[in-house]
Amino acid sequence: MSAQIIDGNALSQRLRAAVAQRATALKARGIQPGLAVILVGNNPASQVYVRNKVKACEDSGLRSVLEKYDADLSEAALLARVAALNQDPSIHGILVQLPLPVHIDAHKVIEAISPAKDVDGFHVASAGALMVGQPGFWPCTPYGCMKMLESIAYELKGKHAVVIGRSNIVGKPMALMLLQKNATVTICHSGTPDLKAMTLQADVIVAAVGKRNVLTADMVKPGAVVIDVGMNRNDEGKLCGDVDFQGVREVAGWITPVPGGVGPMTITMLLVNTLEAAERSAA
């Protein structure tokens, strides 16, 4: 029996409709949630991501301010711009699109963003809040994964979750979010000697390494939930994830597709974070 599909597009539409309603309520109080997006250079992928983020904002009743700069923008100038946006009361969220040109220290720029406007959830203060279970902004991609699990009413308590990948953007925060829901969590990575032995124990698998077919059908326990965060291209140039979708869907109980799975959820959770930042500022 084929796995049930967790449709990220459909779930995103429902969540964005809720964002639009809450944004309307804020506007009635004279507040329009505002997101500033900074793009430095002309990375083609970044341009697509930014365009999608700006459009999603506008479609959901949020104000977006897109600032584009040449690749030779100095680090000092970028930091000065972030500092100015921190002080702007009409801007509730600040997003600096990564990667940045090599002469700019991305960590320094992220840390310059006020934690109250860190809607990407990348600031050390946001990571610390997640670590100790305090209110803060969760990174958008793992936050979206949690919403997908919530959408199928999946009870994580007592389940074994395996996260493949240990990035600061997905793997580590994903593990902490699963832990908060009382799952038993294993993080696997390039130093894990027997990945298959780990994944076969898992009730939930989150694959987030950016490598095609890192998870195949023989590595999945029947009925497991499989969340595919990967974004790759196959030999025909088509978008695919980290999971061998066709094989794994015959074993898993639930699976996310690529495209149409985690991808749309990432931008949706950015909207949710921006809205919450505006609501907090208005409280």
Image: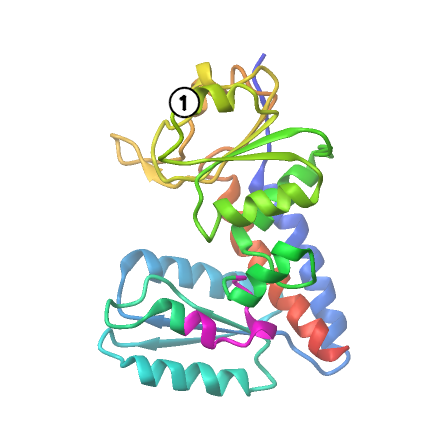
| Vertical order, 68 against 228 (above or below) | below
| Vertical order, 199 against 19 (above or below) | above
Residue at the spot 34% in from the left edge and 31% down from the top edge: 212
Query: Residue 266 appears at what percent x and percent y?
Result: 52, 52
- Tell me if mark 1 has few (under 14), some (14-19) or many (20+) residues whose alpha carbon lies within 10 angstroms of its own: few
Query: Residue 62 appears at what percent x and percent y?
Result: 60, 70
Query: Residue 71 appears at what percent x and percent y?
Result: 24, 73
Q: Which residue bears the numbered disc 1? A: 194
Q: Quick one: 39 or 137, which is closer to the camera?
A: 137
Query: Residue 257 appears at what percent x and percent y?
Result: 49, 33
**Mark 1, secondary structure of its residue:** loop
Which kind of residue does numbered mark 1 sit on? Asp
Judged left or right of residue 73, residue 145 is right
Q: Which residues are magenta?
A: 109-121
Q: Quick one: 219 or 217, which is closer to the camera?
A: 219
Quadrant for residue 154, please give it: top right
| Vertical order, 253 against 89 (above or below) | above
Q: Quick one: 252 or 28, which is closer to the camera?
A: 252
Quadrant for residue 30, please give it: bottom right
